[in-house]
Image: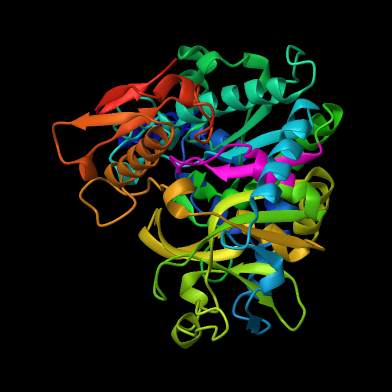
Amino acid sequence: MREPSSNNESNNNSSSNASSSPPPSPPQALLERLKDYGQEDAFAFWDQLSSNQQNYLVQEIESLDLPRIDRMIRCSFQSHGLPAAAIEPVPEGSVSTVEDRKLEDRERWWNMGLKAIADGKLAVLLLSGGQGTRLGSNEPKGCFNIGLPSGKSLFQIQAERIHCLQRLAVQSTNEGSANVVPIHWYIMTSPFTDGPTREFFKSHKYFGLEADQITFFSQGTIPCVSKDGRFIMETPFQVAKAPDGNGGVYSALKYSGLLEHMSSRGVKYLDCYGVDNALVRVGDPTFLGYFIDKGVASAAKVVRKAYPQENVGVFVRRGKGGPVTVVEYSELDQSLASEINQGTGRLRYCWSNVCLHMFTLDFLNQVANNLEKDSIYHLAEKKIPSIHGQTVGYKLEQFIFDAFPYAPSTALYEVLREEEFAPVKNANGSNFDTPDSARLLVLRLHTRWVVAAGGFLTHSVPLYSTGVEVSPLVSYAGENLEAICRGRTFHAPCEITF
């Protein structure tokens, strides 16, 4: 729907054209529908609009699922501020910790995961609705180049990890040369990033993947509302809207028919992650094998909280014997955040959510239906551009972790942040989570891989500020590097390829 001009000229023209006859009234049936839901103010400026603007407004209101949106607003307002059940630490038995994990278990899980991948049971879900605004870019965040020697974007790094995983799955089968089912990659965009993301993949020839193994779909948007639940008008003929949060993925999958698409392809498990992690192990076979072995509906990789006041959400148990869920750092009382488990010496609430999740497809179907039935969204208080300037109101959002309270069983899997979590959220010059900090985490990890495989490094700058990059096409997690690295010397910074 193309937005009509709202400048003075169009308004002046419409005034002169309409001087001989009064402007038409809003469609009566549509106005009555708006009144049913207390949203008739959307037509407040009708008489001041040009005919094009009136048509645009009518089309926009007609495109809204008013009963569904009204239910969202009512349910979200009713639940807002209600006391939540008390929280407890996640039981120790629900977490596979790095220190307690045995080598034979890791190898068994790795092989189980590769078998499931070779059988076509895994799909990968990328949450990629965000723009790189905080990074100083207007492009989708996945297009960002963090400055590695290869110059690869986050999208390319992740695509090449899928490439490598497919090859490893083929090699793990007894036949060795058997054709493996390609790992299907579902990429959730937003209305702001959808077109540029599709074009970026197309212009890069899908980074060597088959075009038909990638499915793009967009998350939805929801009208922004005032403190009394009324639509905020961005212009006299346009409702202010905002994306529905990364948890909008559940309704987007449901309404786009992609859950059925996954089922028809034989998918049983879905690996879900956020785009802005330079070290993400897409479709990690060990994590998948652990997930299958535990027989749970949902699982999450977690890292240990670095310090009590770190701004990260943590996994907790909600209520006595209740479900495992995530509490945002702003909701966790400082005294609780600092409590120590005397038995382990760790923080009692130490398992940080880093948006690395695994779900069964059956569970995703249940979540999509339950979230729709409950229609409870987080109310994010924001200053929203409107016809009255910056209006304080609410954006309605769901988060990816809203699924966990519905899970009959959830397992947590600890990973080391220096191996699997390199967030890219803030521009260089910020104190943390920058492209520079992510690049160094990648280079340092890959340097350790190369040295462990018998390689040597030379460098003309201090090693703490440089290193080598191992192409994901060469190694997924440091495996199979001896033939390339043993006895060889690499000058940092550089990329190691085939």
From where the camera sits, is residue 29 visible?
A: no
Answer left or right for 32 relative to 387: right
Q: Position of residue 29 (x, y in %)?
A: 74, 47
- Count the marks: 0
Region in magenta: 268-289
Residue 287 colored in magenta in the image: yes
Q: Position of residue 177 (x, y in %)?
A: 73, 11
In depth, the one of 468 and 438 nearer the eye is 468
Quadrant occupied by the N terminus: top right
Q: Position of residue 11 (x, y in %)?
A: 38, 36
Residue 282 colored in magenta in the image: yes
Q: Residue at x 28, y 24 (%)?
A: 490
Q: Residue at x 39, y 72 (%)?
A: 307
From where the camera sits, is residue 383 visible?
A: yes
Instruction: Examine the rendered structure and indicate whether residue 426 appears above or below residue 23.
Output: below
Which image quadrant for residue 90?
Answer: bottom right
Q: Residue at x 68, y 83 (%)?
A: 85
Considering every residue shown, the one lying at the far left of the view is: 460
Quadrant occupied by the C terminus: top left
